[in-house]
């Protein structure tokens, strides 16, 4: 999946969370984050802290890879 913005990240987290059978509250508890934060990320809130978003991604089994669009970078 190509991620272009926080909406894409939120959709990926929501899809993985539901596949795992977790509620937002359960995922928040696993990550030691607030349920409100999980909800905001899933809705694509752009001011979310990157470290916490990465923790959510990791917790639902999604790895993040950085690949430059310019192959000379």
Image: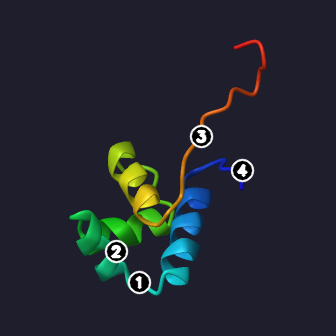
Dividing the picture into quadrants, the one containing residue 32 is bottom left
Q: Tag 1 or tag 3, which sits nearer the N-term?
A: 1
Residue 15 vs 53, above or below: the answer is below
| Residue sitting at x 40%, y 53% | 53
Secondary structure under the numbered disc 2 in the rendered image: helix
Q: Is there a contact, CB below 8 Å, between mark 4 and mark 2?
A: no
Residue 72: image location, x then y, percent = 76, 12
Dividing the picture into quadrants, the one containing residue 37 is bottom left
- Callout 4 crowding tier (Cα within 10 Å): few <14, some 14–19, many ≥20: few
Secondary structure under the numbered disc 1 in the rendered image: loop
| Residue sitting at x 28%, y 64% | 31
The Cα–Cα distance between marks 4 and 2, rounded to whole angstroms, is: 23 Å
Residue 2, disc = 4
Residue indicated by mark 3 = 65
Q: Is there a contact, CB below 8 Å, between mark 4 and mark 3?
A: no
Q: Tag 3 or tag 4, which sits nearer the N-term?
A: 4
Q: Which quadrant holds the N terminus?
A: bottom right
Residue 73: image location, x then y, percent = 69, 14
Residue indicated by mark 2 = 27
Secondary structure under the numbered disc 3 in the rendered image: loop
Q: Is there a contact, CB below 8 Å, between mark 2 and mark 1?
A: yes
Between 39 and 16, the one lying in front of the other is: 16
Residue indicated by mark 1 = 22
The answer to whether residue 55 is left or right of residue 46 is left
| Residue sitting at x 58%, y 68% | 11
The Cα–Cα distance between marks 4 and 1, rounded to whole angstroms, is: 24 Å
Dividing the picture into quadrants, the one containing residue 27 is bottom left
């Amino acid at each position: 999946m190509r991620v272009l913005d926080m909406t894409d990240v939120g959709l990926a987290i929501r899809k993985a969370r539901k596949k795992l059978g977790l509620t937002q509250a359960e995922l928040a508890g696993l990550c030691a984050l607030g349920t409100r934060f999980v909800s905001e990320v899933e809705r694509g809130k752009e001011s979310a802290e990157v470290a916490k978003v990465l923790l959510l991604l990791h917790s639902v089994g999604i790895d993040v890879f950085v690949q430059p669009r310019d192959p000379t970078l």
